[in-house]
Amino acid sequence: MADLFIALVHYPVLDRNARIVTSAITSLDLHDLARSARTYGVRRFFIVHPVAEQRAFATSVIGHWQEHPGRVFDSRRAEALALAQVVGGLDEAIAIAETQSGSPPTLVATSARTSEGISYESLRGKLDDSAGSPVLLLFGTGFGLAPEIMRRANLVLAPIRGVGDYNHLSVRAAVTAILDRLRGI
Ligand SMILES: C[S@@+](CC[C@H](N)C(=O)[O-])C[C@H]1O[C@@H](n2cnc3c(N)ncnc32)[C@H](O)[C@@H]1O
């Protein structure tokens, strides 16, 4: 299998008026995405935030569960959060992924709003190829990834659809559903 990384992007993202903003880190996202990452064999889960205080907040949440007594209280949570890494920008996440995998990752953006994109079957096929390049899946916060991130991505993943028009999942639900399609058995 090729290496799979995920990044939760807090800047640049959109607000409800489609302006570029920086969103705040939600601790629930850290716990839930880390558990999904661990379950589906994600190599590293990046939390991308440009503000030092927000990075310190995320680092303290992660650290609490890495250290005694958090680790003793819930070792499974600690094991999942060990995959989480807080970075200041997407470039840093890409560089770490490249160092870990030995080649630069293919950036794959996700959105509820795209009309088309690479299919889950195709991306799964790339990931199943152990000689394939690593993949870094990008997830948004706020009202989604900013256009500059969508343009920078090498690929955009087809949106998850349900039974009707509505498909605006929480990022926690979207990450789990997407990882299950790409790595679930
Ligand atoms: C727009 S943010 C919403 C953040 C929200 N504040 C929350 O609590 O989750 C949700 C992110 O999950 C992903 N997402 C949500 N629904 C999706 C769908 N139907 N298909 C693909 N990705 C989706 C995208 O990465 C999107 O940027």
Image (cartoon, rainbow, N blue to C red):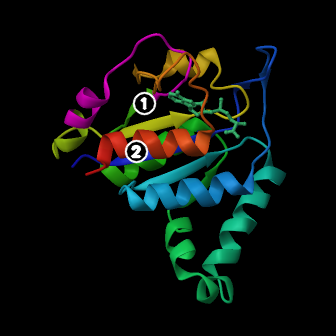
Q: Is residue 28 above or below residue 49?
A: below
Please tell me whether mark 1 sits on a helix, a strand or a loop: strand
- The crowding category of the residue bearing disc 2, from other C-alpha atoms within 10 Å (few below 14, some 14 to 19, many at least 20), is many
Residue 181 badge: none
| SS at circle 2 | helix
Residue lying farthest top?
115
Q: Between disc 1 and disc 2, whose residue precedes?
A: 1
The quadrant where residue 146 appears? top right
In what quadrant does ligand 1 lie? top right
Which residue is tagged 2? 179
Give the residue displayed 66% in from the left and 88% down from the top: 68
Q: Is residue 95 visible?
A: no
Q: Position of residue 144 (x, y in %)?
A: 65, 26
Residue positioned 72% across, 66% down in the render? 61
Q: Which residues are magenta?
A: 109-125
Q: Which residue is at the front of the view, 52 or 18?
A: 18
Residue lying at 56% horizontally and 75% vertically, measured from the top left: 78
Q: Disc 1 residue type? A: Leu
Q: Which residue is mark 1?
A: 107
- Residue at 70% from the left image edge and 26% from the top image edge: 13
Label 1, label 2: how far apart the Cα atoms are = 15 Å
Q: Who is closer to the viewer here, 149 or 96?
A: 149
Q: Is residue 77 left or right of residue 94?
A: right
Of 124 and 103, the residue lying toward us = 124
Rate crowding at label 1 as few (under 14), some (14 to 19) or many (20 or more) other CA atoms within 10 Å: many
